[in-house]
Image: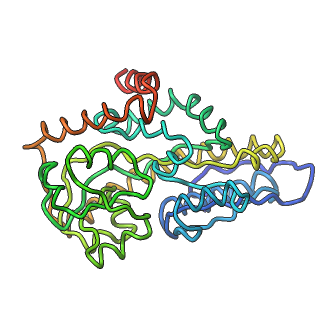
Amino acid sequence: MALVLLPAWPRAATEAQAVTTIRVATLAPDGSPWMRVFRALDGELAERTGGTLRLRIYGGGSQGQERDTLAKMRSGQLDAAALTGTGLADIVRPVLVLGLPGIVDDYPTLDRVQRRMGPRFERLFEREGFVLLGWGDVGKGRLFSKRRIERPRDLRAARVWAPTTDVVFSAFLSEVGAQPRRLGVTEVYPALQTGMVDTVPGSALAAVALQWHSHLDYYAAEHAGILIGGTVMRKEKWDALSEAHQTTLRDVGRRAHGVAKRMLRRADDDALAVVAQRMTAVDTRAHEGEWTRYALRTRDRLVGRVFPRALFDAVLRAADD
């Protein structure tokens, strides 16, 4: 798998033969693009370090919700995790600025903003005891529902899911006058089965990979922003690595995240085609002004409270350049 996804590198000479294992968790199910990339990353690390640096991968949410994963990292039970934007925000809340509606709506803009703002965010994560190994994304954000959602006020009658620690979408719902039903990602599928929720935000990739689409009937034809993610590692574990292992992990990890982005973006397009075959597209453009008005009110509500105005302005400059 490593030879398929990542270019081969010469085997590194090592000073010691002891094996260092990095325990990494993800909500991504087995067989998903993220899991394929992590297995390729493990093979590449083994190749470059003579087998002295390996990953032990826990997929499919086997370590619990993202907040559980972070608690295990802080206690030393886990070393790293691939997190959604919500999980990243549990460490550094200002990262939510990247998910604000109307700022980053396409992949080139997201790549540019993350490239220019990367060092600034890396420092924020290090301050909290984590190393940001790389950015990822999980597709274009849309609404999926059992009912037609054409304009924001339609959400008031819906049973809308929001991640347990979500801030941005919940603030949007509050502006609209809707109430979120807070659940962990792995709790959404049974909630759809029982009717506890009937509307979910997410990407086509997530909706198909987690089988949400099998219980939903409508999807927004237009997307709103890109759902970000990333991989973080406990700084204590990072600092315990040899300099050679740090260099190898940083190098291979960055390339692997680049591969993951390309795979996931293609996979999201493919998943949207699957969704389109089973569900009915809803054109929301007739009410675009109303969606924009609530998005701007949400943004004004969060700037200065969830992320500093200076950071928001810097992201805007990078996005508009």
Q: Residue furthest bottom?
A: 194
| Image coordinates for residue 264, horizontal then vertical, percent | 43, 53
Horizontally, residue 24 falls left or right of residue 191, namely: right
In this rendering, the answer to whether 204 lies above or below 85 is below
Residue in the picture at 39% in, 67% down: 209
In this rendering, the answer to whether 147 lies above or below 167 is below
| Image coordinates for residue 15, horizontal then vertical, percent | 92, 49
Q: Residue furthest left?
A: 286
Which one is nearer the viewer's eye here, 135 or 83? 83
Question: Can residue 283 be seen at all in this image of the molecule?
Answer: no
In this rendering, the answer to whether 258 lies above or below 268 is above
Which one is nearer the viewer's eye here, 49 or 320? 320
Q: Place residue 175 in its image quadrant.
A: top left
Horizontally, residue 153 falls left or right of residue 263, namely: left
Horizontally, residue 43 falls left or right of residue 212, namely: right
Q: Place residue 200 in its image quadrant.
A: bottom left
| Image coordinates for residue 140, horizontal then vertical, percent | 33, 49
Which one is nearer the viewer's eye here, 258 or 6? 258
Q: Place residue 318 in its image quadrant.
A: top left
Figure quadrant of the C terminus: top left
Question: Can residue 229 be seen at all in this image of the molecule?
Answer: yes
| Image coordinates for residue 130, horizontal then vertical, percent | 66, 44
